[in-house]
Amino acid sequence: MYASEREVLPNLISIAIPDSMFLEDDTLREKTVKVGLIARSAAIFGIERIYIYREPSRNGEADYDTAKVIFEYAETPQYLRKRLFGRRKELEFAGLLHPLRIPSHLRDYAVEANEVREAVVVLQNGELMADIGARQLAAVEGRVQEGQRLTVRIISMTPLIVRVEERPSVEYWGYEIRRAPSLARFLKSSNFELLLLTSRLGVGLDTIWKEFCEKCASAPRILICFGSPDKGVDQILKQEKARVTDFPSLYINTLPHQNVETVRLEEAILGTLAIVNLVARV
């Protein structure tokens, strides 16, 4: 069911993942597939932001740049991708990405009065116009800059005119990608009402289920943190001489009694979000 068919979500959920997320992925093809799976999970469960934090033991700037481009490409409506991204080496395997099919990803050239769409500002004949995926560019009301991506509402059909708007609050419009400092620094400066630090060494959800449900249901904003393929959240914090207990959080194992040696990042995200979504948005 699309978000437009339901009430406004009472909780805003974000996730934090390390820039060492590609440790097990040697090729751009593998990296693209991993990002695509995470992007789909984020879209399914209405994730507000994906924070990519620095893993202190590695220089992950190149991998962060790659992940950011692929994440943002996946989240961009198809009709804007060519203008916003052009040809990028990071997108060589973008054809492997499954469509998110979220409400902002309109696929029809036909536009309707009062419709909300994503747009990109282009310069035509010396005038700033908005490409909204229609068969013609639209005049735009509001202060804009060339190349800017924005959300607009159609306020006139003849001529075609749009007005800059905030993203809709009654339906899921996509996630944002944010760079975060190292995990300890990020957690110290965060203002989320609930921090969930996930690890196979955490407390099994089956042992604190009631507390977990109560805290998730009452927290307006939730941040769920994941470790890297070779280090758990606790190990990453130790690199900065920090501990899990330094933060007001729940240190949890969301997949207790697992029957495999390790759970991949994209699997942990999907499983964890399914559980949090169930208890936080009842």
Image (tube, helix red, strand yellow):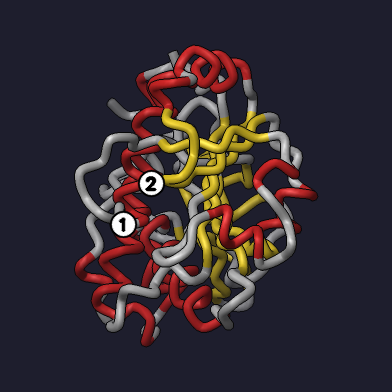
Q: Position of residue 272 (x, y in %)?
A: 39, 37
Q: Is residue 28 left or right of residue 6?
A: left
| Label 1 crowd (10 A; few <14 / some 14-19 / many >=20) | some
For badge 2, the amino acid type reads: Ile
Quadrant where the N terminus lies? top left
Q: Identify the residue shown where x is 37% and y is 53%.
A: 39
The kind of secondary structure element at disc 2 is: helix
The numbered disc on residue 264 is: 1
Vertically, is 17 above or below 6?
below
**Residue drawn at (56%, 65%) of the image:** 121
Instruction: Indicate the quadrant where residue 168 lies.
Output: top right
Q: Is residue 195 left or right of residue 71?
A: right
Q: Residue at x 54, y 78 (%)?
A: 60
In the foreground, 257 or 65? 257
Percent from the top left, x then y, of residue 97?
25, 63
Q: Residues within 10 Å of mark 2 (few under 14, many from 20)?
A: many
Evaluate if marks 1 and 2 touch, with contact meaning CB atoms under 8 Å apart: no
Residue at 71% x, 56% y: name it: 184
Look at mark 2 in the image and give the residue it sits on: 269
Front position in the image: 234 or 213: 234
User: Mark 1 or mark 2: which comes first in sequence?
Assistant: 1
- Residue 109 visible in the picture: no
How far apart, in angstroms, are the residues tagged by discs 1 and 2? 9 Å
Q: Position of residue 93 (x, y in %)?
A: 25, 77
SS class, disc 1: loop
